[in-house]
Image: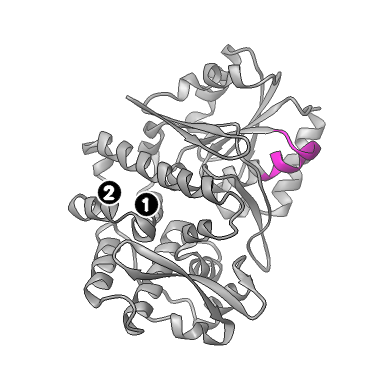
Amino acid sequence: MKDLITVTTAPSYTVHLETGALPQLGSLIKPLSKAKTVVVVSDDHVMPLYGATVVQSLTEAGFTVRTFTVPHGEVAKTPKWLIELIEYLAQACLTRKDMLVALGGGVVGDLTGFAAATYLRGIDYVQVPTTLLSAVDSSVGGKTAVNLAEGKNLWGAFKQPLFVLCDPLTLQTLPETEWHSGCGEVIKYGMIGHPDLLDDLRQKPMTFNVLQQDPSYVRSIIARCIRAKADVVAHDEKEQGLRKLLNFGHTFGHGIEAFTDFTIPHGIAVAIGTALLIRASVKNGDLPAADGQTFLDLLIAHGLPIETDATDEALLEAALHDKKSEGSSVTLIYPVSYGHCELRPVAHKELGNYIVR
């Protein structure tokens, strides 16, 4: 069974979700591209696992294939590795008709997408997510970026992929921590506008063993998240309003990541960021206490922490550099009821009131 999900942007593209589809990558993208050369970008964990399958598929489809491998983790999401990748593309004499393939998680996707947005003022790229987090979130929507010393995702561009291929079989090699990280983003979709998803996750949490026990359930949850993301992006591609909801938990989550020197996975930091805001909303009398406890229990049921050692100062510093910060305020995605959040501008001097442990 497969799901073909259209992301209505300029231009539109398809997310192809199908178990066991990775060997079909070449034949799926061949009709979409005039590329002669394809550079597969991956990290030193994923390339040994799936690189050969992707290279063979692309070669059999008639492409000339090159590979570029970066270190795993946030260490590769930097200007240094962006420049190294772009210089590699120049040395390989890629043209505007050629293409990149991002094989991996969010870091690889962000790095590859940003390189595609800037090399020769823009070439095509394809997303092949291999983590739960990238499958449900970062591979769809066209946000690309690298980190700076001053904050996360501060240098980037909007660049939609040509195509997204998601094969849930690649998730079976995920470490358990990375699975939990992806669950943080899955739960986020329920909290910002999909209470039916929250209901299902409460009834049957996406625990690590569910991947083996009920892969069809996992695939269905992934599909629902992708559709939720696609719907938001279709209405607000450049994050002028509605799309900001997708950043629930991210304002403080980015501070938690930075405080730990990016040793904590992104989705886990986001989960803690949502927990801080959930408790703040309950304390402020905006979110019913029962709903707040339901949210926190759901995070715990998915193996996600709800506390952090990050100092208030670190969280507030991250908020000041947040992309949603304008002038003397920052827009927080603030939970107000079961499965519903609102965009709430908060003055910088008041942000401390929204960090509730």
Which secondary structure is most common in the magenta stretch?
helix
The span shown in magenta is 114-123
* Residue 296 colored in magenta in the image: no
Name the residue tied to disc 2: 206
In the rendered structure, find residue 55 and report the number of the disc placed on it. Answer: none
Placement of 209 over or under 242, stated as above or below: above
Residues 234 and 289: in front is 234
Residue at image coords 59%, 67% = 324
- What colour scheme does the image use? one colour
Q: Residue furthest left?
A: 203
Placement of 290 over or under 3, stated as above or below: below
In the rendered structure, find residue 186 and report the number of the disc placed on it. Answer: 1
On the image, the x and y values in percent for residue 91 come to 81, 32
**Mark 2: secondary structure:** loop
Residue at image coords 56%, 66% = 261
**Which residue type does callout 2 highlight?**
Met
Q: State if disc 1 and disc 2 touch (CB < 8 Å).
A: yes
Give the number of marks: 2
Q: Earlier in the sequence, mark 2 or mark 1?
A: 1
Residues 149 and 17: in front is 17
Placement of 305 over or under 314, stated as above or below: above
Placement of 312 over or under 299, stated as above or below: below
Residues 349 and 125: in front is 349
Residues 113 and 159: in front is 159
Which is closer to the viewer, label 2 or label 1?
A: 1
**Which residue type does callout 1 highlight?**
Val
Bin the neighbour count of mark 2 within 10 Å (Cα to Cα): few under 14, some 14-19, many 20 and up.
many
On the image, the x and y values in percent for residue 204 come to 20, 49
